[in-house]
Image (cartoon, helix red, strand yellow):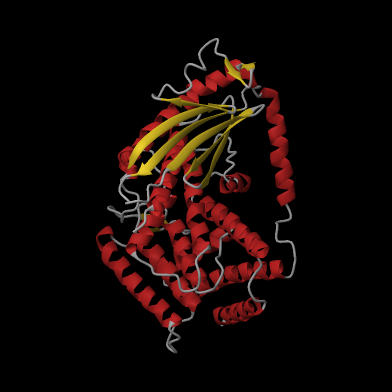
Protein backbone atom coordinates (compact mmCIF):
# COMPACT_ATOMS: atom_id res chain seq x y z
CA UNK A 1 0.00 0.00 0.00
CA UNK A 2 2.95 2.35 0.43
CA UNK A 3 3.23 3.19 -3.27
CA UNK A 4 -0.54 3.69 -3.57
CA UNK A 5 -0.46 6.05 -0.60
CA UNK A 6 2.47 7.97 -2.09
CA UNK A 7 0.58 8.44 -5.37
CA UNK A 8 -2.42 9.76 -3.46
CA UNK A 9 -0.24 12.23 -1.56
CA UNK A 10 1.39 13.36 -4.81
CA UNK A 11 -1.95 13.93 -6.52
CA UNK A 12 -3.31 15.88 -3.54
CA UNK A 13 -0.19 18.04 -3.44
CA UNK A 14 -0.40 18.51 -7.20
CA UNK A 15 -3.95 19.84 -6.85
CA UNK A 16 -2.80 22.12 -4.03
CA UNK A 17 -0.05 23.53 -6.26
CA UNK A 18 -2.40 24.01 -9.21
CA UNK A 19 -4.94 25.76 -6.99
CA UNK A 20 -2.44 28.59 -6.45
CA UNK A 21 -2.68 29.45 -10.13
CA UNK A 22 0.15 30.32 -12.47
CA UNK A 23 3.55 30.78 -10.86
CA UNK A 24 5.13 34.22 -11.07
CA UNK A 25 8.22 34.56 -13.30
CA UNK A 26 10.36 34.96 -10.17
CA UNK A 27 8.94 31.83 -8.56
CA UNK A 28 9.38 29.82 -11.74
CA UNK A 29 12.95 31.03 -12.12
CA UNK A 30 13.81 30.05 -8.55
CA UNK A 31 12.23 26.59 -8.87
CA UNK A 32 13.74 25.77 -12.25
CA UNK A 33 17.21 26.90 -11.15
CA UNK A 34 17.03 24.63 -8.11
CA UNK A 35 15.77 21.73 -10.23
CA UNK A 36 18.57 22.28 -12.78
CA UNK A 37 21.31 22.52 -10.17
CA UNK A 38 20.30 19.44 -8.21
CA UNK A 39 19.47 17.36 -11.31
CA UNK A 40 22.69 18.34 -13.12
CA UNK A 41 24.99 17.77 -10.19
CA UNK A 42 23.47 14.62 -8.72
CA UNK A 43 22.76 12.73 -11.95
CA UNK A 44 26.24 13.36 -13.39
CA UNK A 45 27.99 12.79 -10.08
CA UNK A 46 26.38 9.34 -9.91
CA UNK A 47 28.16 8.46 -13.16
CA UNK A 48 31.60 9.61 -12.03
CA UNK A 49 31.61 13.29 -13.02
CA UNK A 50 34.10 15.08 -10.75
CA UNK A 51 32.59 18.59 -10.79
CA UNK A 52 31.52 19.89 -7.40
CA UNK A 53 28.13 21.52 -6.94
CA UNK A 54 29.86 24.94 -6.99
CA UNK A 55 31.58 24.07 -10.27
CA UNK A 56 28.29 22.77 -11.65
CA UNK A 57 26.73 26.11 -10.78
CA UNK A 58 29.49 27.97 -12.64
CA UNK A 59 28.99 25.83 -15.76
CA UNK A 60 25.26 26.52 -15.65
CA UNK A 61 25.68 30.30 -15.58
CA UNK A 62 28.33 30.24 -18.34
CA UNK A 63 31.05 31.74 -16.14
CA UNK A 64 33.09 28.57 -16.08
CA UNK A 65 35.49 28.50 -13.14
CA UNK A 66 36.72 24.93 -12.87
CA UNK A 67 40.17 24.14 -11.57
CA UNK A 68 42.10 21.14 -12.93
CA UNK A 69 39.05 19.06 -13.85
CA UNK A 70 38.76 16.91 -17.02
CA UNK A 71 37.33 18.79 -19.97
CA UNK A 72 35.07 15.76 -20.55
CA UNK A 73 33.35 16.46 -17.22
CA UNK A 74 32.81 20.13 -18.10
CA UNK A 75 31.54 19.38 -21.61
CA UNK A 76 29.14 16.67 -20.43
CA UNK A 77 27.79 18.86 -17.62
CA UNK A 78 27.21 21.69 -20.07
CA UNK A 79 25.42 19.41 -22.53
CA UNK A 80 23.32 17.88 -19.76
CA UNK A 81 22.25 21.31 -18.56
CA UNK A 82 21.23 22.38 -22.06
CA UNK A 83 19.07 19.26 -22.44
CA UNK A 84 17.26 19.58 -19.11
CA UNK A 85 16.84 23.35 -19.51
CA UNK A 86 14.89 22.64 -22.70
CA UNK A 87 12.86 19.91 -20.96
CA UNK A 88 11.90 22.24 -18.10
CA UNK A 89 10.43 24.66 -20.66
CA UNK A 90 8.05 22.18 -22.27
CA UNK A 91 4.32 22.61 -21.80
CA UNK A 92 1.58 20.16 -21.01
CA UNK A 93 1.24 17.53 -23.71
CA UNK A 94 4.44 18.45 -25.56
CA UNK A 95 5.77 14.91 -25.56
CA UNK A 96 6.46 12.24 -28.11
CA UNK A 97 9.19 9.74 -27.37
CA UNK A 98 11.14 8.47 -30.36
CA UNK A 99 14.39 6.70 -31.07
CA UNK A 100 15.68 9.83 -32.80
CA UNK A 101 14.94 12.02 -29.79
CA UNK A 102 16.63 9.62 -27.38
CA UNK A 103 19.72 9.41 -29.58
CA UNK A 104 19.84 13.21 -29.83
CA UNK A 105 19.80 13.47 -26.05
CA UNK A 106 22.63 10.94 -25.82
CA UNK A 107 24.67 12.95 -28.32
CA UNK A 108 24.07 16.14 -26.35
CA UNK A 109 25.23 14.82 -22.97
CA UNK A 110 28.21 12.72 -24.11
CA UNK A 111 31.78 13.73 -24.85
CA UNK A 112 34.63 11.47 -25.95
CA UNK A 113 38.17 12.31 -27.00
CA UNK A 114 39.03 9.44 -29.33
CA UNK A 115 37.44 8.91 -32.73
CA UNK A 116 36.67 5.31 -31.79
CA UNK A 117 34.65 6.36 -28.76
CA UNK A 118 33.03 9.33 -30.54
CA UNK A 119 31.65 6.92 -33.13
CA UNK A 120 29.57 5.21 -30.42
CA UNK A 121 27.74 8.35 -29.30
CA UNK A 122 24.07 8.53 -30.28
CA UNK A 123 23.98 4.93 -31.52
CA UNK A 124 22.57 1.80 -29.97
CA UNK A 125 25.24 -0.36 -28.37
CA UNK A 126 27.10 -2.77 -30.62
CA UNK A 127 28.48 -4.98 -27.85
CA UNK A 128 26.85 -6.46 -24.76
CA UNK A 129 27.13 -4.69 -21.40
CA UNK A 130 26.67 -5.77 -17.79
CA UNK A 131 27.16 -4.70 -14.19
CA UNK A 132 28.07 -6.32 -10.90
CA UNK A 133 25.24 -5.65 -8.46
CA UNK A 134 25.43 -4.84 -4.78
CA UNK A 135 25.82 -8.55 -3.99
CA UNK A 136 28.83 -8.78 -6.29
CA UNK A 137 26.94 -10.88 -8.83
CA UNK A 138 26.99 -10.17 -12.54
CA UNK A 139 23.83 -9.03 -14.30
CA UNK A 140 23.79 -8.92 -18.11
CA UNK A 141 21.61 -6.36 -19.82
CA UNK A 142 19.62 -7.05 -22.98
CA UNK A 143 21.69 -8.44 -25.84
CA UNK A 144 22.77 -5.71 -28.25
CA UNK A 145 21.12 -7.54 -31.15
CA UNK A 146 17.74 -7.14 -29.45
CA UNK A 147 18.03 -3.44 -28.59
CA UNK A 148 16.35 -2.11 -31.75
CA UNK A 149 13.24 -4.25 -31.30
CA UNK A 150 13.06 -3.86 -27.54
CA UNK A 151 13.35 -0.07 -27.69
CA UNK A 152 10.79 0.10 -30.49
CA UNK A 153 8.35 -1.94 -28.40
CA UNK A 154 9.02 0.09 -25.24
CA UNK A 155 8.46 3.38 -27.02
CA UNK A 156 5.24 2.19 -28.68
CA UNK A 157 3.79 1.04 -25.37
CA UNK A 158 4.91 4.15 -23.50
CA UNK A 159 3.55 6.53 -26.14
CA UNK A 160 0.25 4.62 -26.16
CA UNK A 161 0.05 4.93 -22.36
CA UNK A 162 0.77 8.67 -22.57
CA UNK A 163 -1.91 9.09 -25.25
CA UNK A 164 -4.43 7.30 -23.03
CA UNK A 165 -3.68 9.72 -20.16
CA UNK A 166 -3.92 12.78 -22.37
CA UNK A 167 -7.14 11.56 -23.97
CA UNK A 168 -8.73 10.99 -20.54
CA UNK A 169 -9.20 7.24 -20.98
CA UNK A 170 -10.67 5.49 -17.95
CA UNK A 171 -8.25 2.62 -18.53
CA UNK A 172 -5.18 4.89 -18.51
CA UNK A 173 -2.36 4.12 -16.11
CA UNK A 174 -1.36 6.67 -13.53
CA UNK A 175 1.30 9.03 -14.97
CA UNK A 176 3.79 7.91 -12.30
CA UNK A 177 3.30 4.27 -13.31
CA UNK A 178 4.03 5.14 -16.94
CA UNK A 179 7.19 7.10 -16.08
CA UNK A 180 8.57 4.59 -13.56
CA UNK A 181 7.75 1.52 -15.69
CA UNK A 182 9.62 3.18 -18.54
CA UNK A 183 12.60 3.77 -16.27
CA UNK A 184 12.78 0.12 -15.21
CA UNK A 185 12.54 -1.26 -18.74
CA UNK A 186 14.97 1.26 -20.17
CA UNK A 187 17.75 0.53 -17.64
CA UNK A 188 17.17 -3.21 -18.17
CA UNK A 189 17.72 -2.77 -21.93
CA UNK A 190 20.70 -0.45 -21.34
CA UNK A 191 20.65 0.59 -25.01
CA UNK A 192 23.86 2.66 -25.16
CA UNK A 193 27.50 1.85 -24.52
CA UNK A 194 27.51 4.44 -21.70
CA UNK A 195 25.31 7.09 -19.99
CA UNK A 196 22.31 4.79 -19.69
CA UNK A 197 21.59 5.96 -16.15
CA UNK A 198 21.70 9.63 -17.11
CA UNK A 199 19.48 9.16 -20.15
CA UNK A 200 17.06 7.00 -18.15
CA UNK A 201 16.61 9.76 -15.57
CA UNK A 202 16.31 12.44 -18.25
CA UNK A 203 13.64 10.52 -20.16
CA UNK A 204 11.71 9.56 -17.03
CA UNK A 205 11.68 13.19 -15.93
CA UNK A 206 10.65 14.23 -19.44
CA UNK A 207 7.57 12.04 -19.10
CA UNK A 208 6.81 13.40 -15.63
CA UNK A 209 7.17 17.06 -16.63
CA UNK A 210 5.04 16.67 -19.76
CA UNK A 211 2.32 15.10 -17.57
CA UNK A 212 2.50 17.99 -15.05
CA UNK A 213 4.67 16.39 -12.37
CA UNK A 214 8.05 17.72 -11.23
CA UNK A 215 11.38 15.99 -11.92
CA UNK A 216 13.34 14.02 -9.33
CA UNK A 217 17.03 13.61 -8.59
CA UNK A 218 18.98 11.15 -6.51
CA UNK A 219 21.34 12.54 -3.86
CA UNK A 220 24.44 10.74 -2.64
CA UNK A 221 22.74 9.03 0.36
CA UNK A 222 20.00 7.77 -1.97
CA UNK A 223 22.32 6.18 -4.53
CA UNK A 224 22.72 2.87 -2.72
CA UNK A 225 18.95 2.29 -2.23
CA UNK A 226 18.35 3.26 -5.86
CA UNK A 227 20.92 0.74 -7.11
CA UNK A 228 19.82 -1.94 -4.67
CA UNK A 229 16.15 -1.70 -5.69
CA UNK A 230 17.16 -2.00 -9.33
CA UNK A 231 19.47 -4.91 -8.53
CA UNK A 232 16.74 -6.79 -6.67
CA UNK A 233 14.29 -6.37 -9.55
CA UNK A 234 16.80 -7.23 -12.28
CA UNK A 235 18.42 -10.21 -10.62
CA UNK A 236 16.08 -11.64 -8.03
CA UNK A 237 12.48 -10.87 -9.01
CA UNK A 238 12.11 -8.00 -6.55
CA UNK A 239 8.85 -6.06 -6.20
CA UNK A 240 8.81 -3.10 -8.66
CA UNK A 241 6.42 -1.24 -6.34
CA UNK A 242 9.24 -0.78 -3.83
CA UNK A 243 11.30 0.97 -6.50
CA UNK A 244 8.27 2.95 -7.67
CA UNK A 245 7.60 4.13 -4.12
CA UNK A 246 11.24 5.15 -3.73
CA UNK A 247 10.97 7.38 -6.81
CA UNK A 248 7.54 8.65 -5.74
CA UNK A 249 9.02 9.95 -2.49
CA UNK A 250 11.59 11.87 -4.54
CA UNK A 251 8.80 13.42 -6.59
CA UNK A 252 7.11 14.41 -3.32
CA UNK A 253 10.32 16.16 -2.28
CA UNK A 254 10.27 18.16 -5.51
CA UNK A 255 6.62 19.04 -5.02
CA UNK A 256 7.31 20.25 -1.48
CA UNK A 257 10.04 22.49 -2.89
CA UNK A 258 7.45 24.10 -5.19
CA UNK A 259 5.08 24.61 -2.25
CA UNK A 260 7.90 26.18 -0.23
CA UNK A 261 8.56 28.70 -3.00
CA UNK A 262 4.85 29.51 -3.36
CA UNK A 263 4.60 30.08 0.38
CA UNK A 264 7.75 32.20 0.49
CA UNK A 265 10.10 29.81 2.30
CA UNK A 266 13.83 29.56 1.58
CA UNK A 267 14.72 26.56 -0.60
CA UNK A 268 18.50 26.90 -0.52
CA UNK A 269 20.44 24.23 1.32
CA UNK A 270 21.64 25.25 4.77
CA UNK A 271 25.27 25.01 3.73
CA UNK A 272 24.97 26.92 0.43
CA UNK A 273 26.29 30.13 2.01
CA UNK A 274 29.18 28.20 3.55
CA UNK A 275 30.01 26.79 0.13
CA UNK A 276 29.93 30.21 -1.52
CA UNK A 277 32.24 31.62 1.15
CA UNK A 278 34.62 28.68 0.71
CA UNK A 279 34.79 29.18 -3.07
CA UNK A 280 35.43 32.91 -2.61
CA UNK A 281 38.20 32.24 -0.09
CA UNK A 282 39.87 29.76 -2.44
CA UNK A 283 39.89 32.41 -5.13
CA UNK A 284 41.54 34.83 -2.74
CA UNK A 285 44.20 32.27 -1.86
CA UNK A 286 45.12 31.87 -5.52
CA UNK A 287 45.99 35.54 -5.92
CA UNK A 288 49.49 35.18 -4.46
CA UNK A 289 50.45 33.10 -7.46
CA UNK A 290 48.49 35.03 -10.08
CA UNK A 291 50.02 36.84 -13.02
CA UNK A 292 49.20 40.52 -13.30
CA UNK A 293 48.26 41.97 -16.66
CA UNK A 294 51.31 43.21 -18.55
CA UNK A 295 52.67 43.51 -22.09
CA UNK A 296 54.40 40.15 -21.95
CA UNK A 297 51.48 38.38 -20.27
CA UNK A 298 48.89 39.53 -22.82
CA UNK A 299 51.22 38.76 -25.71
CA UNK A 300 51.74 35.22 -24.40
CA UNK A 301 47.98 34.72 -24.06
CA UNK A 302 47.50 35.92 -27.63
CA UNK A 303 50.13 33.56 -29.03
CA UNK A 304 49.17 30.50 -26.97
CA UNK A 305 45.38 30.77 -26.91
CA UNK A 306 43.86 33.49 -29.04
CA UNK A 307 45.74 32.84 -32.27
CA UNK A 308 44.49 29.23 -32.55
CA UNK A 309 41.02 30.30 -31.35
CA UNK A 310 40.68 33.03 -33.98
CA UNK A 311 42.11 30.82 -36.71
CA UNK A 312 39.65 28.01 -35.98
CA UNK A 313 36.78 30.51 -35.79
CA UNK A 314 37.61 32.01 -39.20
CA UNK A 315 37.95 28.57 -40.73
CA UNK A 316 34.61 27.26 -39.44
CA UNK A 317 32.75 30.49 -40.26
CA UNK A 318 33.92 30.27 -43.88
CA UNK A 319 31.25 27.57 -44.40
CA UNK A 320 28.79 30.44 -44.93
CA UNK A 321 30.89 32.44 -47.43
CA UNK A 322 29.05 31.18 -50.51
CA UNK A 323 25.65 32.09 -49.03
CA UNK A 324 26.30 35.84 -48.90
CA UNK A 325 27.33 38.43 -51.47
CA UNK A 326 30.21 39.66 -49.33
CA UNK A 327 32.06 39.05 -46.09
CA UNK A 328 34.17 41.53 -44.14
CA UNK A 329 36.48 40.70 -41.26
CA UNK A 330 37.24 43.33 -38.63
CA UNK A 331 39.46 43.46 -35.59
CA UNK A 332 38.98 45.95 -32.79
CA UNK A 333 41.48 47.23 -30.26
CA UNK A 334 39.70 49.12 -27.52
CA UNK A 335 37.25 51.32 -29.47
CA UNK A 336 39.18 51.37 -32.75
CA UNK A 337 37.93 49.07 -35.51
CA UNK A 338 40.02 47.93 -38.50
CA UNK A 339 39.18 45.90 -41.60
CA UNK A 340 41.55 43.05 -42.45
CA UNK A 341 41.92 40.73 -45.41
CA UNK A 342 43.85 37.78 -44.00
CA UNK A 343 44.11 35.65 -40.90
CA UNK A 344 47.15 37.38 -39.40
CA UNK A 345 44.63 39.40 -37.34
CA UNK A 346 46.44 41.02 -34.44
CA UNK A 347 49.94 39.73 -35.27
CA UNK A 348 51.32 43.12 -36.22
CA UNK A 349 49.96 44.77 -33.11
CA UNK A 350 51.25 42.03 -30.84
CA UNK A 351 54.76 41.99 -32.30
CA UNK A 352 57.65 42.96 -30.02
CA UNK A 353 57.52 46.76 -29.77
CA UNK A 354 53.96 47.19 -30.98
CA UNK A 355 52.10 50.42 -30.37
CA UNK A 356 48.94 52.01 -31.66
CA UNK A 357 47.37 55.47 -31.46
CA UNK A 358 43.91 55.42 -29.91
CA UNK A 359 41.95 58.65 -29.31
CA UNK A 360 45.07 60.68 -29.86
CA UNK A 361 47.27 58.84 -27.36
CA UNK A 362 49.86 56.15 -27.71
CA UNK A 363 48.45 52.76 -26.68
CA UNK A 364 50.76 50.04 -25.40
CA UNK A 365 49.82 46.50 -24.49
CA UNK A 366 49.54 47.21 -20.79
CA UNK A 367 46.69 49.63 -21.54
CA UNK A 368 44.60 46.97 -23.29
CA UNK A 369 41.19 46.20 -21.82
CA UNK A 370 39.64 44.34 -24.75
CA UNK A 371 40.01 43.14 -28.30
CA UNK A 372 37.46 41.70 -30.71
CA UNK A 373 37.42 39.68 -33.93
CA UNK A 374 34.26 40.26 -35.94
CA UNK A 375 32.87 38.69 -39.12
CA UNK A 376 30.19 40.56 -41.04
CA UNK A 377 28.23 38.70 -43.72
CA UNK A 378 26.24 40.98 -46.05
CA UNK A 379 23.24 40.21 -48.29
CA UNK A 380 22.05 36.62 -48.19
CA UNK A 381 21.94 35.41 -51.83
CA UNK A 382 19.18 32.84 -51.94
CA UNK A 383 16.15 34.53 -50.47
CA UNK A 384 14.69 36.92 -53.02
CA UNK A 385 14.51 40.49 -51.82
CA UNK A 386 15.20 39.57 -48.20
CA UNK A 387 18.92 40.40 -48.42
CA UNK A 388 19.65 40.11 -44.74
CA UNK A 389 23.11 40.22 -43.16
CA UNK A 390 24.60 38.55 -40.10
CA UNK A 391 27.36 39.47 -37.67
CA UNK A 392 29.35 37.19 -35.43
CA UNK A 393 32.26 37.97 -33.14
CA UNK A 394 34.56 36.77 -30.37
CA UNK A 395 35.29 39.33 -27.68
CA UNK A 396 38.23 39.14 -25.23
CA UNK A 397 38.28 41.21 -22.05
CA UNK A 398 41.55 41.60 -20.18
CA UNK A 399 41.13 42.03 -16.43
CA UNK A 400 43.73 42.42 -13.73
CA UNK A 401 44.35 38.71 -13.24
CA UNK A 402 42.44 36.94 -16.00
CA UNK A 403 40.97 37.11 -19.47
CA UNK A 404 37.33 36.46 -20.33
CA UNK A 405 36.06 35.20 -23.68
CA UNK A 406 32.48 35.84 -24.79
CA UNK A 407 30.83 35.32 -28.16
CA UNK A 408 27.97 36.74 -30.19
CA UNK A 409 26.18 35.44 -33.27
CA UNK A 410 23.21 36.88 -35.09
CA UNK A 411 20.87 38.96 -33.01
CA UNK A 412 22.07 38.37 -29.47
CA UNK A 413 24.88 37.19 -27.23
CA UNK A 414 25.38 33.44 -27.11
CA UNK A 415 26.01 33.32 -23.37
CA UNK A 416 29.12 31.32 -24.23
CA UNK A 417 31.65 32.59 -21.74
CA UNK A 418 34.87 31.21 -20.37
CA UNK A 419 37.21 32.79 -17.86
CA UNK A 420 40.88 31.86 -17.61
CA UNK A 421 43.81 33.00 -15.52
CA UNK A 422 46.69 34.52 -17.50
CA UNK A 423 48.72 31.45 -16.53
CA UNK A 424 46.14 29.17 -18.16
CA UNK A 425 45.97 28.52 -21.89
CA UNK A 426 42.86 27.41 -23.73
CA UNK A 427 42.87 23.68 -24.39
CA UNK A 428 42.23 22.37 -27.88
CA UNK A 429 38.84 21.08 -26.77
CA UNK A 430 37.88 24.42 -25.22
CA UNK A 431 38.74 26.13 -28.50
CA UNK A 432 36.63 23.65 -30.44
CA UNK A 433 33.73 24.04 -28.02
CA UNK A 434 33.75 27.86 -28.14
CA UNK A 435 33.87 27.91 -31.93
CA UNK A 436 31.28 25.16 -32.32
CA UNK A 437 28.80 27.00 -30.09
CA UNK A 438 29.40 30.32 -31.86
CA UNK A 439 29.09 28.97 -35.40
CA UNK A 440 26.09 26.80 -34.48
CA UNK A 441 24.24 29.85 -33.11
CA UNK A 442 25.10 31.77 -36.29
CA UNK A 443 23.78 28.88 -38.38
CA UNK A 444 20.51 28.78 -36.42
CA UNK A 445 20.09 32.53 -36.79
CA UNK A 446 20.66 32.36 -40.56
CA UNK A 447 18.07 29.61 -40.93
CA UNK A 448 15.58 31.53 -38.79
CA UNK A 449 15.96 34.62 -40.99
CA UNK A 450 15.05 32.90 -44.25
CA UNK A 451 11.55 33.72 -45.43
CA UNK A 452 9.70 30.81 -46.97
> Where is 425 relative to 249, above or below?
above
Quadrant showing the N terminus: bottom right
- Residue 81: x and y, percent? 52, 53
Asked if one can make out residue 190 in the rendered structure from this viewpoint, the answer is no
Q: Say which quarter of the image contains residue 321.
A: top left
Residue ranking furthest to the top: 353
Quadrant showing the C terminus: bottom left
Residue toward you, 140 or 205: 205
Asked if one can make out residue 185 in the rendered structure from this viewpoint, the answer is yes
Q: Is residue 265 left or right of residue 3?
A: right
- Residue 67: x and y, percent? 58, 35
Residue toward you, 180 or 390: 390
- The mark total stands at 0
Residue ranking furthest to the front: 385
Residue toward you, 3 or 153: 153
Q: Is residue 204 left or right of residue 16?
A: left
**Residue visible at 58% across and 61% down in the picture:** 222
- Residue 109: x and y, percent? 44, 51
Amino acid sequence: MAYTNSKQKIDLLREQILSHGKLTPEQLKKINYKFRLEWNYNSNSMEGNTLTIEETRSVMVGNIMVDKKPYKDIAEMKGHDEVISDILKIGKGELRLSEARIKQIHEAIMYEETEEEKAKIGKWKETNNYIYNYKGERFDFVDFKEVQDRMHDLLNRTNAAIDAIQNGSKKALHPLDVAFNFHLEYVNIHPFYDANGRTARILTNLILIALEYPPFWITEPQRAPYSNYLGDIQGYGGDPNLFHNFLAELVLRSQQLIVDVIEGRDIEADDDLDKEIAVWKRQLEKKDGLLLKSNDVIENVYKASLTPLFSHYLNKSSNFDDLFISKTIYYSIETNKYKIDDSSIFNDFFSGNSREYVSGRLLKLKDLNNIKLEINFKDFKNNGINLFGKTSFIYIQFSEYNYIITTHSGGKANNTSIEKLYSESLTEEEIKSIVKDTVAKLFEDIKASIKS
